[in-house]
Amino acid sequence: MKRRADRRQDNEAKSVDGAPADSHLPVKRRCLDRPLTCGIALQDLPPELVECVLRYLAVRDVVSLGGTCRYLRDVCNSPRTWRSLCRRIRPDVREAADWRRLTILNHTKGMSFHHFAGRWRTSSNIMPPAAPNGFQRFLVTADNLCILDYWGALFHISGNIRAPSFIFRNGEWETYLNCAALRPDVKDFTVDPRSDASCRRYFYVLASREVRDAKLQVRECDCVEIYHQSTAKRIFKMTFHPSMKMKKMVLLGMEADRQLLLLSGEGRWRTELGKVYSVTINELSFNRPRSYITHLRLRKISEILPDASVTQMCSHHSSVLYVTGDGAVHLEAHSAAIYQDIFGTLEGFNPLNTQTPVPISIANKVVLCSLGRNHLALVDEFGRIFMQGNNRFGQLGTGDKIDRGDPCQIPYLRNPTDIFCGLNHTLVLVPSRDSVMEIHGCGCGARGRLPGWPKGSPSFVKLLLKVPVFARRISSTRDCLYIMSSYDPEEDNRYRAIPTIASDDAGIGKAAQTCEEFLHQLLRYTSIQERVAKTRDFITHLPLQGYQKDCLWQALGMVQRAAETNRTDGHQHHCKK
């Protein structure tokens, strides 16, 4: 005991003299107790060292770091940094015009699908093949997928999608499929627009190819090639004159009388821009190879509106939707039943001339559209969604099942990334306030078409499934929902803000007066039940989002239940006394 006390006194004496009392401890522990005195920041390092550090970061971290200051933004956006990141994802790429865009496209590409019924009623991800430079568009055939990248190359993803082999990796189910490059210089591709994927035995490809004329000069021509969906073997080819350039195509009709609609692009004559042509193809004769010459016919919409330039086309089995350059919309219905479902009447329908387009009145320019069997969806330049057509299953999302013969606005959904009209349901891919992608759906929920809502819904509801952060396009068949992920940093926002009007002050004053009148009416009611019921009715007419109204309604319910509980407790306490 005496030796221990003497040793403690010696340590205290050393600490008084200025030496640390814990000098006998290891050096590492003393270093941890001392504050850091290094004054070197990341901004003080030369760009070469910062680039070496950035090579070990993820793509998302590099993008986030570039938004901190001007110096790091210049270093993070340098071609050398993105070239090293791109080669880590795509070692086969040697040269690129924009390394940053190429890296982001390959980093964000992905494909996921959700099976509605059967053995694999779950969500899973397809391992993205390394060859495509991002996913621009995708197409679902009977058993396979076709993917078009941003460089115009078409890839055929083969495998049994309906019953794939899954692998559990990184907390998610993934499946591996075979990917084969089909052909480059592809402009567009399409299949049978019906919701039944088993009808999609062939897919059509619009591409460019080089041919030699009589003078042995190489000229670039557009052509339509038809491939079999299972073997990806070309079975038909149609070449156009070099002066005709096409940029989009859609399909109509049945297999025996298939109509291929082609939208012209910038050719030799600029007056041909935006014209619609049609050609009839018999798919049942593909097993009898032969050569013949066919003629393109100018569609009725280009004859009636010669000055209008069509920019978008959407088709279904018996109808086509056209969008012109000024945002006007015209519908072409080929049957009386479809015409009556969409417009609610047969007035104006001519069974002898079904190609005559019917204008759809909408106030603003349309930038996005989708067409189902008996209903359609339009999105204007301000991001507002309008629905029209048959509403038997609630596929219009208006909250009821009343048909609409004119476009009806959906007030609680804005700025959709993509919209899809199915057989009797509608899906909308929309970003939330915290930049998380969500899929909202309405209509029939049979066979799991609306995950989480088996009985369906007459209004748009959030589907209970995991949506990728960079989801861009959606498509649905009878047995599966497909979600494509991709992000292009050079893509422009298609929507713009609603312009302010000089009469906004008057509108705000009128709204304030309405609120004041409501408060005066609320004072007339004595019971809390009556006041809560009146407030619920007032919230219904407010221009709020759906989730905001639900939140206020739930809060009113809590207040009402708390008031009833307090009243019951007070009555019981009075009875005990």
Image (cartoon, helix red, strand yellow):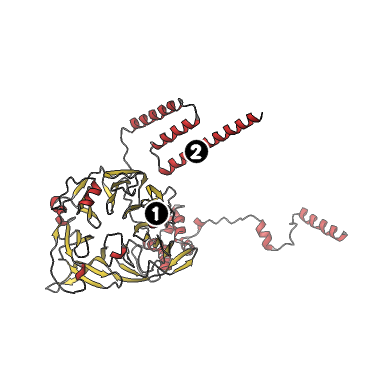
Q: Amino acid at mark 2?
A: Gly
Q: Position of residue 519 (x, y in %)?
A: 44, 28
Q: From where the camera sits, is residue 82 visible?
A: yes
What label does residue 557 carry, if any? 2
User: Which is more N-terminal, label 1 or label 2?
Assistant: 1
* Farthest left residue in view: 214
Could you tell me if the residues under marks 2 and 1 are in contact, i.e. CB atoms within 8 Å? no
Examine the rendered structure and indicate whether residue 24 appears above or below residue 492. below
Distance from label 2 to label 1 (Cα)? 28 Å
SS at mark 1?
Answer: loop
Mark 1 = which residue? 450
Q: Quadrant of residue 568?
A: top right
Near mark 1 (Cα within 10 A), the count class, few <14, some 14-19 or many ≥20, is: many
Q: Position of residue 74 (x, y in %)?
A: 42, 56
Examine the rendered structure and indicate whether residue 539 appears above or below residue 62. above
Give the left or right position of residue 342, taking residue 77 as reference: left
SS at mark 2?
Answer: helix
Q: Position of residue 159 (x, y in %)?
A: 37, 70
Q: Amino acid at mark 1?
A: Leu
Is 310 or 396 nearer to us in this picture? 396
Q: Residue at x 53, y 56 (%)?
A: 41
Q: Residue at x 24, y 58 (%)?
A: 317
Near mark 2 (Cα within 10 A), the count class, few <14, some 14-19 or many ≥20, is: some
Q: From where the camera sits, is residue 150 visible?
A: no
Examine the rendered structure and indicate whether residue 151 appears above or below residue 72. below
Is 75 or 501 nearer to us in this picture? 501
- Quarter holding the N terminus is bottom right
What label does residue 319 carry, if any? none
* Farthest right residue in view: 2
Q: Residue at x 38, y 68 (%)?
A: 129
- Quarter holding the C terminus is top right
Q: Residue at x 77, y 53 (%)?
A: 16
